[in-house]
Image (cartoon, rainbow, N blue to C red):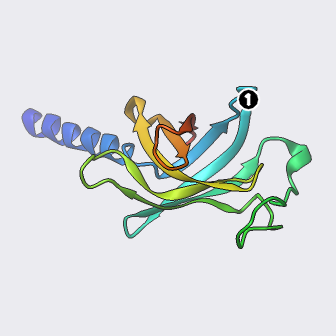
Amino acid sequence: MKTALIALSLVAACGTALAQSTPAGLWKTIDDETKQEKSLVRITEAGGVYSGKIEKLSDPTKANAVCEKCTDERKDKPVVGMVILRNIREDKDDKGVFEGGDILDPNNGKVYKAKLKPIDGGKKLEMRGYIGAPMFGRTQTWIRVE
């Protein structure tokens, strides 16, 4: 009986670890320059495809901001509630890496290719936005909120 309980506990712990190895969840984004919290982004999964939406902006003066510089269907739309991360899938050859889609920077309206990688047991997320090849971009570390 004791062995069965230990085995069940290990299975439960592994399930929790696996759940944290995806980018799905609520993430705190950090400003590259100021190192201050910038926003909360919720990443969801549907049919193996991940997308992320801004739930909250940390700066209360930007609560009603719109994406003036966007050039696609998001132009002049509210930033809060905007899908900024879309069409991300887990790499079949590199498990634990999620890519293939894009991310929008609502500050400048530019859309970049995106690559996500949960790190630190899923507590953090490396979000790399780039043009062309991944070496031509920048990486932000997002922190899991839930």
Residue at 63 percent of width and 50 percent of height? 41
x and y, in percent, of residue 56 in the image = 74, 50
Q: What x and y, as percent, mark residue 8?
A: 18, 42
**139 is higher (above) or lower (below) than 41:** above
Under circle 1, the secondary element is loop
Q: Measuring 45% from the left and 48% from the top, which residue is drawn there? A: 23
Image quadrant where residue 146 sits:
top right
Q: Position of residue 97 (x, y in %)?
A: 36, 46
Residue 93 placement, left or right of 55: left
Q: Work out which residue is located at the far bottom of the displayed protein and give it.
A: 73
Please give the count of numbered marks on the rendered protein: 1
Coordinates of residue 92 in the picture (x, y in percent)? 26, 55
Q: With 88 as the anchor, is 94 left or right in this view?
A: left
Q: Say which residue appears at 54% left-offset and 57% top-offset.
A: 102
Q: Is residue 142 left or right of residue 88?
A: right
The answer to which of 21 and 114 lies nearer the viewer is 114
Q: In this rendering, is residue 81 above or below 127?
A: below
Pointer 1: what residue? 36
Amino acid type, callout 1: Gln
Q: What residue is shown at x 36% (from left), y 43% (from top)?
A: 21
Quick one: label 1, few (<14), some, or many (20+) residues within 10 Å? few
